Image (tube, helix red, strand yellow):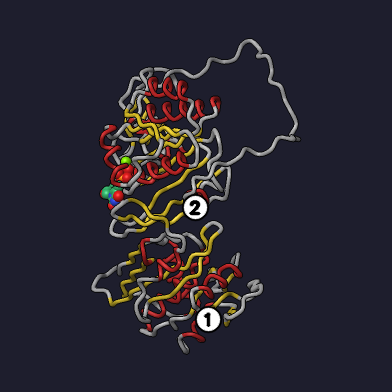
């Protein structure tokens, strides 16, 4: 874009637009486009030739960098097996979800494991952070604490201290004095993150950036810096629930989609080693509309309860309310049930929910969703010792999904004895489970709900 021309930038995704608009074409968010200071011209056309860089081949004798484990297993697993030196990590999440709590506990664990840790807070005064540490029982952890927002001072401090890990809480409060816009603006957030990531790579300091998810307004969201960092973690959870899930959405050093489960308690976040037991613990006696999905999150099997409620609608356009699942997926499954199995949901309100505040993204949940919907509609409870999984295709066929054996093992461990899976699933050697394999949804409806 030409020099001096005002630029309009989306605070949610960072896309640059020529003129203001109510909706960002790039990410679809509303009211997120703000005017930024004019862009400075990019580099001029290259005249003289550079000196050329030295190239090497891929072979190396070097051992992979040692990872530092914090001892918090839920965190280490999401990081891909511990903290990689000189890596840049972004931890995003809604305000108040518990990011500062998590990272203060992580800093203390890493410090106890022998890493030199620095915690820089731009949001709270040092005394406030100390008070939180006191509440969490972490006052004896050897963590160095600083309260500062000026990045120049922070970088100088990091250069002097050379910690193994520096936590910056949050990136939206940081500002560079070379940039002429307010802290939190897209250009400040992007440039501050760039400076910190470059510092991490060149000086060998691992950096964790905290980013608040912003719904609208003048503050840039964490998505603006996602592409700059090695690892992107989101800390999620429903406000009313005590469960918190740390999810890796991008990881250059480990599997994406890995989750760590925590519980927010009166004295900080407690790790949940067996999330399936926890998510199912609230289940009361078998009721229509409830189905247990045997899912996989990253490398770990997790059982969740899918709940549905179907009721006659007083509205012309019936309601479709979904919590914890993709609403597009619900529409697809309802359409398949209607078109392939002849079971209409027109005139009925449908509410769908994943118990415990969990979010399920796997297509393998389709069959459990369909089962919960049918069970609610027909008022027939699904046997309490049954789990389900399988992807539903538009033709109504059930498609096999990955890691069948792991799903069945976890279900068996939790006392389930029956499973419904797509045909051609690779069962492996699971004992103690009666597995029924079905090729399409019509067969499933006939089998579990009579003629449907
Ligand atoms: P915080 O870590 O400040 O959130 P963030 O940094 O993501 O904005 O956590 C805020 C919430 O966590 C606050 O509403 C209170 C709750 N909390 C507890 O329930 N127990 C605790 O021990 C702590 C420290 C916080
Ligand atoms: Mg905070």
Question: Residue at image x 34%, y 26%?
Answer: 36
Give the vertical position of 226 relative to 361 (above or below).
Answer: above
Give the vertical position of 363 relative to 109 (above or below).
Answer: below
Give the vertical position of 29 relative to 312 (above or below).
Answer: above
Residue reaching furthest to the bottom: 450
Residue 181: image location, x then y, percent? 32, 23
- Which residue in the structure is indicated by mark 2? 73
Quarter of the image that includes the C terminus:
bottom left
- Which residue in the structure is indicated by mark 1? 418
Question: Residue at image x 49%, y 76%?
Answer: 387
Q: Disc 1 on helix, strand or loop?
A: strand
Q: CA distance from mark 2 to mark 1?
A: 31 Å
Residue 114: image location, x then y, percent? 50, 38
Q: Is mark 1 within 8 Å of ligand 1?
A: no
Q: Disc 2 on helix, strand or loop?
A: helix
Find out whether the residues at labels 2 and 1 contact each other: C-beta distance under 8 Å. Answer: no
Mark 1 Cα within 10 Å, few/some/many (few <14, many 20+)?
many
Depth order, front residue of 354/330:
354
Depth order, front residue of 254/224:
254
Tell me where residue 148 sits by quadrant: top left
Residue 210: image location, x then y, percent? 39, 38
Upstream in sequence: badge 2 or badge 1: 2
Q: Is mark 2 within 8 Å of ligand 1?
A: no
Question: Residue at image x 36%, y 61%?
Answer: 357
Residue reaching furthest to the left: 314
Residue 257: image location, x then y, percent? 51, 53
Is residue 264 visible in this depiction of the protein?
A: yes
Is residue 30 visible in this depiction of the protein?
A: no
Quarter of the image that includes the N terminus:
top left
Residue reaching furthest to the top: 48
Give the vertical position of 282 relative to 443 (above or below).
Answer: above
């Amino acid at each position: 874009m030409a020099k001096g021309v005002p630029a309009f930038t989306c605070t949610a995704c960072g896309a640059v637009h020529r003129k203001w608009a109510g909706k960002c074409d790039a990410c679809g968010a509303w009211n997120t486009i703000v005017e930024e200071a004019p862009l400075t011209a990019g580099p001029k056309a290259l005249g003289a030739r550079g000196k050329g860089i030295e190239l090497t081949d891929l072979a190396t004798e070097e051992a992979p960098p040692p990872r530092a484990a914090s001892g918090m297993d839920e965190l280490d697993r999401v990081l891909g097996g511990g903290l990689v030196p000189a890596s840049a990590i972004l931890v995003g999440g809604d305000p108040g979800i518990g990011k500062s709590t998590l990272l203060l506990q992580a800093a203390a664990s890493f410090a106890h494991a022998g890493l030199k840790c620095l915690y820089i807070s731009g949001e709270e005064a040092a005394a406030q952070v100390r008070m939180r540490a006191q509440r969490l029982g972490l006052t004896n952890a050897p963590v160095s604490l600083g309260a500062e927002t000026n990045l120049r001072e922070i970088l100088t401090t990091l250069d002097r201290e050379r910690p193994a890990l520096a936590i910056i809480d949050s990136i939206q409060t940081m500002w560079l004095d070379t940039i002429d816009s307010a802290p939190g603006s897209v250009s400040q957030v992007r440039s501050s993150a760039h400076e910190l990531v470059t510092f991490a790579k060149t000086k060998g300091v691992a950096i964790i950036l905290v980013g608040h998810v912003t719904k609208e307004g003048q503050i840039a969201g964490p998505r603006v810096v996602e592409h700059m960092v090695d690892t992107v973690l989101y800390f999620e959870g429903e406000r009313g629930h005590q469960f918190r899930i740390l999810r890796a959405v991008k990881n250059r050093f480990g599997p994406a989609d890995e989750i760590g489960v925590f519980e927010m308690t009166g004295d900080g976040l407690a790790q949940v080693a067996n999330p399936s037991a926890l998510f199912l613990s609230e289940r009361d006696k078998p009721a229509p509309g409830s189905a247990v999905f045997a899912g996989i999150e990253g490398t770990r099997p997790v059982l969740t309860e899918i709940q549905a409620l179907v009721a006659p609608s007083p509205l012309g356009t019936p309601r479709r309310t979904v919590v914890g699942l993709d609403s597009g997926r619900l529409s697809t499954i309802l359409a398949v049930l209607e078109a392939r199995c002849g079971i209409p949901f027109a005139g009925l309100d449908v509410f769908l929910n994943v118990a415990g505040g969990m979010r399920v993204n796997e297509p393998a949940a389709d069959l459990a969703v369909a089962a919960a919907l049918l069970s609610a509609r027909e008022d027939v409870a699904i046997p309490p010792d049954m789990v389900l999984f399988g992807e539903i295709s538009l033709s109504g066929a059930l498609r096999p999904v990955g890691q069948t054996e792991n799903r069945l093992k976890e279900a068996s461990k939790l006392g389930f004895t029956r499973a419904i899976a797509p045909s051609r699933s690779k069962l492996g050697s699971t004992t103690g489970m009666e597995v029924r394999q079905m090729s399409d949804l019509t067969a499933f409806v006939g089998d579990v709900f009579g003629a449907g």
